Amino acid sequence: MKFASPIFQIKNVSRLFRQQTFIMPESRIIGLVKDKYQMLRKYAYEKFSKFPQFHPESPKKLLFDYFISIIRIILLILIPLEIAYTPGIAFRELRIFTMILTTLLALEILIRLNTICYVKGHAVLDRFEIVRQQFNNLIFIDFSTLAPLYYFLSKTDTS
């Protein structure tokens, strides 16, 4: 009793797959780039794993977040006054203070890249996934708001 037709035997099917499958050989340069990428990722992971991760609900992190919120409120009041009335408070008289505030905001970005985040209710502990989540969420906005501050600080420094 035969169950399969002679056309659909295993050797015919494997020959059919070989004929229709075209595997492009990987070029040497692409292989080298992939190897270098893996080595760089491993090196970065080894270096970054030495830094402790911050838990978002730890008392020190919450205190730091409150402090950063106060800094944002100060800048929220100071920058519109500077734009509307140009008294020179933020960029001339209190230039050092403004530089310290913007440096602390840049430090907060770096700390946030090392803080455990939650995705769909689960804590993400993988550092590369944390960085990816942060870049997808707010890092671009933070950099775009800090860049004008550094620009105006450097502009008033030269004049």
Image (spheres, helix red, strand yellow):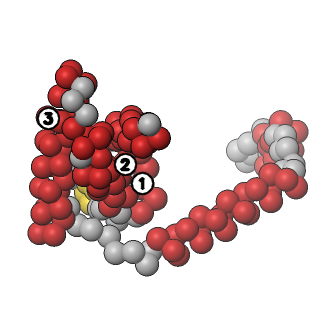
Q: Residues within 10 Å of mark 3 (few under 14, many from 20)?
A: few
Amino acid at circle 3 = Ile
Query: Which residue matches tag 3?
Result: 77
Looking at the rendered structure, the secondary structure element under dot 2 is helix
Residue plotted at (16% across, 69% down): 60
Task: Say whether residue 145 is left or right of residue 67.
Answer: right
Q: Residue furthest bottom?
A: 50
Q: Tell me residue 104's x, y (percent).
A: 29, 56
Residue 153 sits above or below residue 84 on the image: below
Q: Quadrant of residue 53?
A: bottom left
**Residue labelled with disc 2:** 134
* As drawn, 121 above or below 47: above
Tell me where residue 79 sits by quadrant: top left
Dot 2 amino acid type: Gln
Residue to which mark 1 is pinned: 131
Q: Earlier in the sequence, mark 1 or mark 3?
A: 3
Q: Are marks 1 and 2 in contact (CB under 8 Å)?
A: yes
Three-letter amino acid code at disc 1?
Answer: Val
Q: For this rendering, which residue is in front, 107 or 103? A: 103
Mark 3 vs mark 2: in front: 3
Residue 101 in view of the camera: no
x 84%, y 40%: residue: 22
Answer above or below: position of 76 versus 85. below
Instruction: Decide which of tag 3 and tag 2 comes sooner along the chain.
Output: 3
